[in-house]
Amino acid sequence: MSYSRRGFLTAVGATGGAGALFATMGALGLAPTAEAAARTAFVPPQPSDFTLTGRGAKKVVVLGAGVAGLATAYELGKAGYDCTVLEALDRVGGRNWTIRGGDRLTELDGSTQVARFSDGVYLNAGPARLAQWMVTMDYARELGVALEVFTNANAQAYIFHEAAGMTAPVRWRTAKADVYGYVAELLSTATDAGALDARLTAQDKERLIAFLRGFGSIGNRAQGFAYTGGERRGYHVDPGAGEQPGVELEDVPTLSEVFASGVGQRFSFEFGYDQAMLMFQPVGGMDAIPRAFADAIGGHRIRLRSKVTRITDLRDGVEVEYQDKNGRGQRIRADFCVATMPPHILARTPHNLGPDVQAALATPTVNSAGKIGLEYRRRWWETDENIYGGITNTDLDLASMWYPSYGYGGRRGLVVGYYNFGAQADAYAALSHRDRERRAVEQGMKIHGPKYRDELAASVSIAWKLQPHIEGAWVGWPSRTGAYQLLNRPAGHVHFAGDWLSYMIAWQSGALESARKTVTDLHQRVLSS
């Protein structure tokens, strides 16, 4: 008797179970071995997995319709799992929230803002950028979410360090030219004087000096490797036609002044693996990603305004109690539960998962972050200051200001007037929205002048610590052992997922990678049972 490969695997699964099936598939190179699992690309569950084993998909209740919860239901749904998603908010996405005109923001104390933004103007209140290597890009492609470039670094943007004595902002390009120039001058001089002879050969020294001349735009040996400025710093008058060569910026600061300003500390940002250009954003707002997930899952599987009130692990499954959109208590039974709510919210939710799980959920520290979106009647940052996207960094309590990477050349636009964290975010959270706006505008005028106040049309601010059912921007772990490891394993029939269970906390990619891990763990558990 002869078997096709499919027929052979079906027979193995039927007689030896999922363990024998996976071992056989691994031997045939069709499934990862245990040793290779950690480095193998994610393989979504498929209906054929059940066909081969003679088993059936299970019922799963997912707690939270943030990115992790949506991805979990989406991937399990590919194999036919019966998934129900419970979400306390009236929208999907969790911290992935794009605010448009007409949207309401209500904080824990009941204070409410209504966005008055114009058509086409929006604020990505949570995540706002995607790195090219992140799995988020793959899901955007798979779900048909159109992307465009997000300008994460812009030579035309500013740096402003008031505490260092700066009275006016300096362009990013100008600051970088000065820092690189003086560093190159110092290192070239030291190298040529023999300070590095113990480390470098004569040829090495010449090659290093040649590199530094280009790196810092400095003079040659006869000129003492001096940095004297140049066109890299920018122009008072840009080059033009005829007899207009341009007028370079003058008044080059001294080496001491440049180092005292602290501007050099900003440039390491560009080298961060998760921050390096190019970066991307969905066209029309970041919430295109959760909305695409929700469409793929099916709206009938997502129950909004459904607050979880109790999680009970059972001998043969799980029961979740929740309050529905009408305020009535409901219960749902399932074979498994995937809890993707923030850990500090889960820690306040009654459950019978044990004291170790409770202690683990209470372990991470909640971090604050805040933003304000300022819509202006005209795009003066483009027309007056030639800034098209990018970020201005400051030592003010607004931290950073973002210029929009969409709508170039349009009539109106939105500047993120502050994006701050920790104590700075807490300070703004303690204010009313109008006071947040006033404080942000007063600070921003130090960089952009009176138009930053006079041309303002509308604003919305968000303090993530005050957002119901979220109450924080992200969490931090004291270590990746103990509690972190415990929650990366199931507690009875309850599994956990979220960016907080990844090494990419605060990134959607972390939520997606965690969801994939949990989906794989749960699916293998079902196939092995």
Image (cartoon, helix red, strand yellow):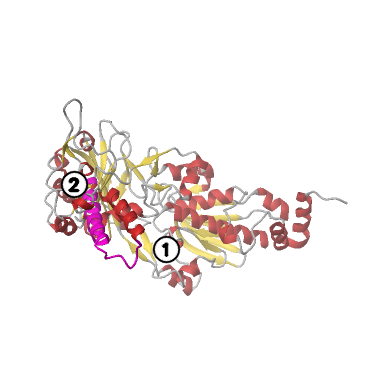
Q: Is residue 504 above or below residue 373?
A: below
Amino acid type, residue under disc 2 in the picture: Gly
Gap in angstroms between the C-alphas marked 2 and 1: 52 Å
Question: Is 364 a magenta residue?
Answer: no
The residue that label 1 is drawn on is 343
- First in residue order: circle 2 vs circle 1: 2
Relative depth, front residue between 37 and 464: 37
Q: Which element type, helix, strand or loop, lies under badge 2?
A: loop
Q: Is residue 221 visible?
A: yes
The percent coordinates of residue 173 (x first, y second) are 24, 46
Would residue 33 appear left or right of 90 to someone viewing this image? right
Q: Which residues are magenta?
A: 173-201
Q: Quadrant of residue 358?
A: bottom left
Q: Which mark is residue 407?
A: none
Amino acid type, residue under disc 1 in the picture: Pro
Going 38% across and 52% down the picture, which residue do you hit? 95
The percent coordinates of residue 167 (x first, y second) are 11, 51
